[in-house]
Every structure is written in structure tokens, then in C-alpha cells.
Image: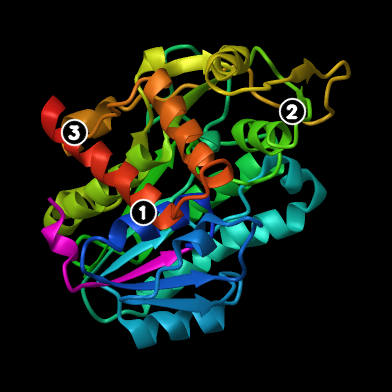
Amino acid sequence: MFKCFKNKKIIITGHTGFKGSWLLAFLSTLNCKIFGISKDIPTDPSHYKLLNIKKNFKNIKLDVRDKKAIVKAFKQIQPDFVFHLAAQSLVKTSYNFPELTFNTNAIGTLNILEALRNLKKKCTAVLITSDKSYKNIEISRGYKETDIIGGEDPYSSSKGCAELIIRTYVNSFFTKENRVRIAVARAGNVVGGGDWSKDRLIPDCIKSWVKNRTVLIRSPYSTRPWQHVIEIIYGYLVLAKNLNKNQKLHGEIFNLGPAQKANYSVIQVLRYFRQSWEKCKWKIAKHKSLEKESKLLKLNSNKAKKILKWKTNLNLRETLEMTLSWYRSYYINKEDMYKISINQINDYLKNIKKVN
């Protein structure tokens, strides 16, 4: 399925984060040479640390804000593929540290583009932004790739800035004759095992419930396009595969979100948890946060479905059960989490073959 990655040199920025570590796990099964670039390990526990991958993998401790070091690393590695996921991805943190957020998400992306611009060989790059790049006007039809970008909170705005920078570089420096091909991927609310980030629904719930504590819920009726992390990682790889062989996809943007019917509210997710996890306790926050939070957020992924032949295959129940199963394996059964993660990836691929 992914023969194009065999024996290739692949850079993942942000490989120690939630999505980055799952991409690392997926690629570790494809017999390629992986170079992970990240400034630190953002959480403890950490999915990246639990994977403990050593074969065909090199960990490089660098900050994407350090342009000189990033350009030098790319020059030394001479990658065939690049997946840029490094980011300050938390909305609440973006309010506390707006300068850090803009420097990481916008200037960090510019530095990756500069490193790509200095390459003298063919390279395929998938740059990850966010569904929050869109100017959110609470529309129900789902945002299309052509809709206006922009955001009122620092995180969303920084991702919108990154997209403007990418568009400028593609139009100014990476022409279709250039050896570097670039595409942008926007995803929805990604969930799955191994996420211990702050101020995210499922990590907050799991961290509280394993200690028999009550979790505080800020926005119980906000809806989100929930999707499992394996589905989105699979989408990144499908996009890279297609971009590598089809020059016409250079500069294109793809929404990689779930079906419209997969939008569910926070309270609906909590009610499912109550059926599948013991000692679920939560309470609704009485005071509203000063931070702005979208009530409705949907993506329209028809373009990815038509051109990439990609779509989500898991419904909400399957997505949440896979997530809870991973955490049970870690907290209750004390299993080998690399094996559990790889088993979930392989099970997902088997289900795709059955469906298709």
C-alpha cells in the first residue's frame, strides 16, 4: 500500500507529540529511515517514550524556531519526505503564551519552508495545519478548502498565518517545475490512545477517572468533528503518496475530517464513556471561560474523498472504543504499548481492506 516510503529518508517534525508519535509508529512498520525533529517531550506519560522505537530511527533535538539549525539538519539528511507536525497546539496555552505560539506555528513553518527551499533534490512535504485555521462563522455545511481562513484566538490565528506563509512560498518559490512538492492537510478533533495533553476532553477525563476524580467540563454542548488519530495519520500518508506521484497536487489543501454525521457534542461523548468506563464523574463549569471557544466546527472532506480516495471509516462508537481500549491496556492491563499501538494500526488497515 505504501511502497513509496520503502528505504526512503523521512523527516517528522513534532514526532514526540500525540499525532507525531502515531505517525512515527505507523512509519516504523514501513521499512524506511525516520528522522524525528522535536525540541522536547511535551507530556509525561508520553506515547513517544512508550513506543521506544530505535530501529531505523534517529531522534534529533531541535526547535523549529531555530532556522539555522533546521536548515542545516535538512541539508545533512536530504529527506525524500517531510511531515511537518511540530506546533504549539493548545488553545489555552496560546492565550498564556501568544508570542511562543506565533513563533512556533507561523515562523516555525516558515523555517521549514526555508529548509525545503535549500534542498537540491526531489522531496515531498505534507504540512499540517488545523481545522481552526478557518474563520469560524458557525456554519453547518462544513468548511471547504476554499473558505476564508482566520481566527480570533492566538492558536487559530497562528495557524492561519502559517497557511498564508505556505501559500506565499508555494506561489513565489516552489513552482511546479521545482523538485519540492508541498501540500497542506487540515484535520478535525483528533482523539486516540496516548494523548496526555492539557485541556483536551479525553485526556482530562482519563487522567481524572484513573484517580477517581471528577472532571470539569467547560462546553458540554459544543460539537466537534471527532476522528481517531490512526485515520488522520493514514490520511497524511495517503496524501504524501499521491503528492509524490502526481505533480498536479502541488500546492493543494485537503480537509481530512470525518463524515458530517460524525459531529457530536461533548455531552454525547461523555454519555458514551459512562457506558464503557467505570467511575465516570463530571460536572459542568458554572462560570464561562474568558477564552473564546467555537460551538460548532465542521469540515467538508469531499475533495479528499474524490481526489485522494480517502475517507474516515470509523464511527463514533468505534473511535471511542479504540481510544478507551488503548488506555485500559496502559492503566489497567499494563501491556506493551508499542505492540498495542501497532495492533490497532494493523486492525485498522485490515478493516479498510474489508470495507473497500
Q: Indicate yes or no whether the magenta region holds residue 10.
A: yes
Crowding at dot 1, Cα within 10 Å, few <14 / some 14-19 / many 20+, comes out as: few
Question: Which residue type carries mark 1?
Answer: Lys
The residue that mark 3 highlights is 352
Highlighted magenta segment, given as a residue range: 1-13
- Seen at 64% across and 23% down, the residue is 294
Residue 331 occupies which quadrant of the picture?
top right
Give the distance between the C-alpha atoms of the residues marked 3 and 2, in whole angstroms.
Answer: 37 Å
| Vertical comparison of 171 with 311: above or below | below
Q: Secondary structure at mark 1?
A: helix
Locate residue 161, reporting x and y percent.
57, 49
Q: Nearer the viewer, residue 210 or 64?
A: 210
Residue under circle 2?
Answer: 292
Which of the two marks, 1 or 2, is nearer to us in this view?
1
Q: Amino acid at mark 3?
A: Ile
Residue 356 belongs to the span the image colors magenta: no
Left/right placement of residue 239 relative to residue 92 reads left
Residue 340, position as x, y percentages in the image: 39, 48
